[in-house]
Amino acid sequence: MKPYLLRKICSIVFLLLGGFTVVSYSQASNVEIKIRLAQSYERSGNFEAAVKLYEEAFGKDSANVTIFESLKRSYLQLKRYDDAISLIQQWLRKIPNDIGLLAQLGSIYILNSDEASAVTIWDRAVATHPTLEATYKIVGGAMIQSRLFERAIELYKRGRTACGNPALFMSDIAYLYSIMMNYTDATREYLKMVRQNPNDLGLVQSRIAGYTTRADGISAATLAVEDAVKTDPNTVAYQQLLAWLYMEGKQFDRAYNVYKIIDEKMKADGRELYNFAERTLREKAFTVAIKAFKDIVNRYPKFAQLPQAKFGYARALEESYDLGDTLKLFGILERPAAGLKPPYSSAIESYRQVISEYPNTEIAARSLLRVSIIQQEKYFDLDGARSSLETLEKNSLRFSPILFECRLRLGNVYLSQGNLTDAANKYNALAGIGSGFNELKEQAAFRLAELDYFQERFNDALTKLQTLTTQATANVTNDALSLQIFIQENLKSNEPALRQFAKADFLKRQLKFSEALIMFESILKENPKADIADEASINIGDILTHMNKYSEAIAAYERALQEYPETIYQDRTLMKIGQIYQLGMKDKVKAIEAYQRLLEKFQNSIYSNEARKKIRELRGDSI
C-alpha cells in the first residue's frame, strides 16, 4: 500500500475513534451532572426531583452502585416501597445470593405491610449460607430494625443450632429480651455469658443495670440468679452477680452472706469482704459495714489491710451514730445528754486502738483526726479537741493532707474558744500553702474573712470575700457570696443592727446559745422591718432547735415565713421545719406536709430533690 494512502486511512480511523471518545465522555459527563444535581435536591429535601434525576441516571448506568443506593434511599423517603422492592429485585437478578440485599428487601416488605413476603425473603437469605454466623447477624439485624424482636430471637436460636455453637448470640438475645421487658429470660442469657466467660461479669452487670432501676427488673434478675446459684453453687461468677444484685437492691445483709462465700471460694483471705465493707460504708449501710469490718479483723489477723479495716470499723461506728443526730443538718453542734454515756465512745475507743497498735503511721494520724472531730463537733469538748489537734500537728509532718486539715480545724477550735489571734495565725499559714491544696486554702481564706466580720471589720471582710467570689471553687464561693451580700445589704441600710448581729453570730459560733438567743431576739424586736430581721428570726429557730425546744423553733420558723415572705431563705426554712418534724418530733405526717409545701412553692429549689427523697423515705416507698 502506498504511504500516502496508509496515512489517510490512519487519519480516518483516528478521527472515528476520537469521535466515539467524545460521545462516551459526553454521556458520562451528563450522568455525573444528573447525579450531582439529584444529590443537591436530596440534601434540600426535594426527593421527588431527586428521584426523577436518579432514575434517568440509573437508566444510563444501571450498574452504578452509588446511583442504585441513592435511588433506593429516595424511594424509601417518599414511601414508594413498591418501587424500592422492584429496584432491589432488579439488582438481585445480577447477584441473587447477596445476603445484605435480601435482608434489606425483607425490611422494605415490612414497611410495605407484607410480613409474609418479608419472612420468605429472609428465609431465602438464610438459605444462601445457613452455617455462617454472619448470615444470622445480618438478617437478625434487619428484623431488629423492623422491630420484630421475637422473630430475631427465634432466628438467633436457629443460628446456634445451624452453626453448631450454643454460645452464639447470647448478648443479642439477652438484649432483645430486655427490650421486651422479659427480664427473667434476659438474665438467663446473661448468666450463660458469665458461665462461658467469667471475665464478662463486668459487661453483664452493666447490661443488667439497664433494668435494675425498675422494681420488676431487679426482682426478676435477682430471682433468676438465685435459681442459678442453687443449681450451680460452685460457679463463683454467679455468686458475684448475686451479691452485686443484692447491693443494687439495698439488701446489704444478704449481700454480706454471699460475699463471705465468695471470699472463701476465691481464697481471698478477706479481700472480697473488705471491698464489700468499704462499699457498704459508702452506701451508709453502717450496721452491715460494722459487721463486715469486725469479721475481717476477727477472721483474718494477717490481712494486709488490717489497719484500714480497723479504721473502717471505727468510721462505721461513728457514722452510725450520726444517723441519729437530729441537729447535724442545721449546722449546729450537739452536746451529749447529761448522765448518759456519750454515744460516740465506742468509735473513739476503736480509733484509739488503731493509734495504739499502729503508731506513727498515716492511719493512726487519720484516727486521731477523727477523734478530734468528735470531740469538737459532737461533744463540744474544745480543750480535748485542741489537745488532740496539737498532738496531731506535731506528729503528722509527713502526712501533708492530714496536717493541713488539722491546722484548719485547730483554727476553728481557737475561734470557738475566742482565741482569735491564734485562729488567724493558723488560717494565714494555710492560706499561703503551695498548690495542690486549693480547697483548704480557700476555706482558710474564708475563715479569715469571717474573723473580720465577727470583729466588725466589715470593709476588710468584704475585700477578702470579693477575692473569694471571683477565684474560689463552688463550695467556698457560695458561702463567700452569701456573707458578702449579707454584709453589703445591711451595712448600707442598718449598720448598728449589723454590728449587733455579728456579735450574736459569734456567740452562736461559740455555742453560747442563751446569750445569742437574747441578742437575736433583741435585734428582731428593735428592727422588725429591717432587712436583717428575717436572718435574726431564722437564727432564733436554729438556736431553739438546738435547745430541743422543737415546738418553739417551728413557731419561730413559721413566723419568719409569714412575716418575711420575700426572704430568700423560705425554701431552706421549710426544709428545716420538715427536718424538725421528722427527726426531732418523729411526726411523719407533718414532716411530709412541710416537704410538700416546699415542693409546691419552690419547684426549682436546691432542696427539692432532698425533699422528694425524704417524702419517699417517710412513706416507705422504694427509692
Image: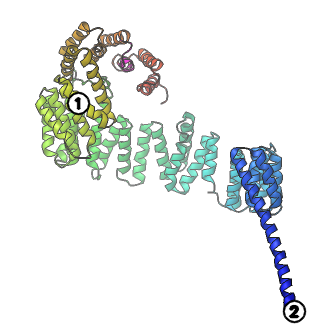
Q: Residues within 10 Å of mark 2 (few under 14, many from 20)?
A: few
Q: Residue at x 68, y 47 (%)?
A: 43
Residue 569 lies within the magenta run: yes
The first of marks 1 and 2 along the sequence is: 2
Instruction: Tell which of 185 and 116 is nearer to you.
Output: 116
**Residue 333: x and y, percent?**
24, 25
Can residue 183 be seen? yes
**Residue 336: x and y, percent?**
22, 23
Q: Residue at x 17, y 24 (%)?
A: 457
Q: Is residue 41 left or right of residue 293?
A: right
Amino acid identity at mark 1: Thr
Instruction: Choose mark 1 or mark 2, whichever is in front.
Output: 2
The stretch of residues the image draws in magenta is 564-579
**Up/down of 443 relative to 610, above or below:** below
**Residue 20: x and y, percent?**
83, 71
Amino acid identity at mark 2: Lys
Would you name the residue on which mark 2 appears? 2
Q: Quadrant of residue 347?
A: top left
Could you tell me which secondary element the residue under label 1 belongs to? helix
Q: Quadrant of residue 181?
A: top right
Which of the colour schemes (rainbow, by chain, secondary structure, one colour) is used? Answer: rainbow
Kindly identify which numbered label has been placed on residue 449: none
